[in-house]
Amino acid sequence: MGYTFQGGFLENKTRLLAYAAVLVIFVFAVSTLTSNRQETSPSGYIIAKQDESASKANSLNQIDDVQKQLDKLKLDINTFSSNLTSCYSNTGELTSNLQNCKKDVALCNTELTKLNANKSAGEQTCLNDKTSLQLNLSFIGTKLAQATKDLSNLTTEHDALEKQYSALSANAANNICCKTKVDNPNVKYYSIENDKIACKETSGIPISC
């Protein structure tokens, strides 16, 4: 709600000064008329009497005007006082609202500080977790690389062992089955069954004698 009391107050003050000036002039005029009356000679009594009557009538009119202006001034002063009282009341309400707003702002600043602190703590925790995960990932990567290398080596060894086993099995089968072939010329093949070499006539791995 806006108020224009400062401008009204200056205007009323100016008007009050004007009314006071009029009143002073009026008092001065009455004083002057009274003095002139006392100095009038008997020979000019009739003219002075007429002037006095006119002066009285004029003075009464001026008094009425001044009274009207004083009444209006009183009304303006009452209006100004009422507006001033309303202004004080609204100022008190606005001051209270301002204090409440300041409290709300202080609470918001406190909450913001807490949130910023929690944010910083959360960011630090995430950074620590990220660093830990990166270290674990690097460790697992190293282990995986070593395991892959070990697996390759084991596969190579396995293949070599299989070749050796196959060669050993073939030599052993040829020795055994070739001897058996002397007694049984129909023996031409062999197989390994239950970790044992079996000489056969019809199917299996051919022997070389």
Image: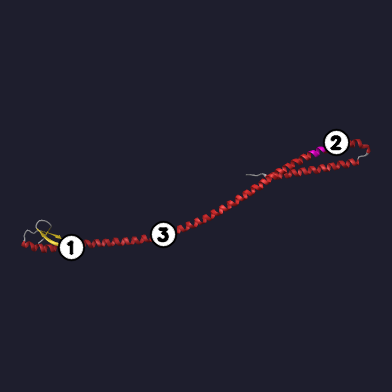
Name the quadrant of the N terminus: top right
- The three-letter amino acid code for the residue at tag 2 is Ala
Give the crowd class for mark 3: few <14, some 14-19, many >=20 residues within 10 Å. few
Name the residue carrying label 3: 129
- Chief secondary structure of the magenta portion: helix
* Disc 1 from disc 2: Cα separation: 158 Å
The answer to whether 129 is drawn above or below residue 97 in the figure is: below
The answer to whether 61 is drawn above or below residue 86 in the figure is: above
Of discs 1 and 3, which sits in the foreground? 3
* Disc 1 from disc 3: Cα separation: 52 Å
- The three-letter amino acid code for the residue at tag 3 is Asp
Give the crowd class for mark 1: few <14, some 14-19, many >=20 residues within 10 Å. few
Where is residue 28? Give x, y as percent.
83, 43
Give the crowd class for mark 2: few <14, some 14-19, many >=20 residues within 10 Å. few
Name the residue carrying label 1: 165
Q: Are marks 1 and 2 in contact (CB under 8 Å)?
A: no
Q: Residue at x 79, y 38 (%)?
A: 64
Residue 53 horizontal side relative to residue 139, left or right: right
Magenta region: 60-64
Where is residue 105? Give x, y as percent.
56, 53
Q: Residue at x 86, y 42 (%)?
A: 32
